């Protein structure tokens, strides 16, 4: 075995290990995800209606979590005139209330 063959095989093993880690992270985050697309959630400064869910590692965390992306809503549950898209990390969620969900249903 030459050095090139060694490094090539090692790179393949590393790539497979990275894929396996990302698969594990996705499975962990999604199994701990209590929200679905269409839910309305809030953090300390915004309220959004979820339209996409991603899996990320927050800065300094050893475990993955979901990041929810969606259109920002006003306090009455209606979208702003100029649509704004924002995101909320799962650890920062403060409120997923039925009141917000009912307000959104009324607007549709």
Image (cartoon, rainbow, N blue to C red):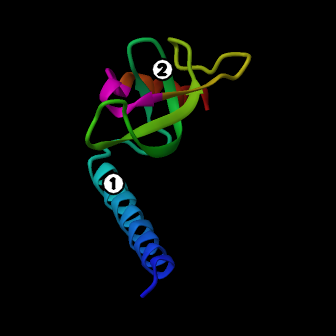
Q: Nearer the viewer, residue 107 or 94?
A: 94
* Place of residue 35 in the rendered image (x, y in percent of width and height, measured from the top left): 37, 41
| Mark 2 element type | strand
Which residue lies at the image location 40% right of the left edge and 66% below the top edge?
14
Which badge, 2 or 1, is on the more N-terminal residue? 1
* Place of residue 103 in the rendered image (x, y in percent of width and height, measured from the top left): 49, 23
- Packing grade of label 1 (10 A; few <14, some 14-19, many >=20) is some
Residue extending farthest to the right is 82
Which residue lies at the image location 53% right of the left edge and 19% below the top edge?
77
Magenta-drawn segment:
88-98
Instruction: Please identify the quadrant where the C terminus is shown.
Output: top right
Q: Is residue 9 above or below residue 63?
A: below
**Which residue is labeled 2 in the image?**
47
Q: Nearer the viewer, residue 15 or 54?
A: 15
Number of the front mark, 2 or 1:
1
Please tell me whether residue 97 belongs to the stretch shown in magenta: yes
Which residue lies at the image location 52% right of the left edge and 31% below the top edge?
49
Instruction: Please identify the quadrant where the N terminus is shown.
Output: bottom left
Quadrant hosting residue 56: top left
* Place of residue 99 in the rendered image (x, y in percent of width and height, measured from the top left): 38, 22
Q: Is residue 55 above or below residue 48?
A: below
Tags 2 and 1 touching, CB below 8 Å = no
Residue extending farthest to the bottom is 1
Question: What's the CA distance linking mark 2 and mark 1?
Answer: 26 Å
- Packing grade of label 2 (10 A; few <14, some 14-19, many >=20) is many
Q: Nearer the viewer, residue 108 or 49?
A: 49
Numbered mark located on residue 82 in the image: none
Q: Is residue 23 above or below residue 4?
A: above
**Which residue is labeled 1 in the image?**
25
Which residue lies at the image location 32% right of the left edge and 49% below the top edge?
29
Q: Nearer the viewer, residue 60 or 103?
A: 60
């Amino acid at each position: 075995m030459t050095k090139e063959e060694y490094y090539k095989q090692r790179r393949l093993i590393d790539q497979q290990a990275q894929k396996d880690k990302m698969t594990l992270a996705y499975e962990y985050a999604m199994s701990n995800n209590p929200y679905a697309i269409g839910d309305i959630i809030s953090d300390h400064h915004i309220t959004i209606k979820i339209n996409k869910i991603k899996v990320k590692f927050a800065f300094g965390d050893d475990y993955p979590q979901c990041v929810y992306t969606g259109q920002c809503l006003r306090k009455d549950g209606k979208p702003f005139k100029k649509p704004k898209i924002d995101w909320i990390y799962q650890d920062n969620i403060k409120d997923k209330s039925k009141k917000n969900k009912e307000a959104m249903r009324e607007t549709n």
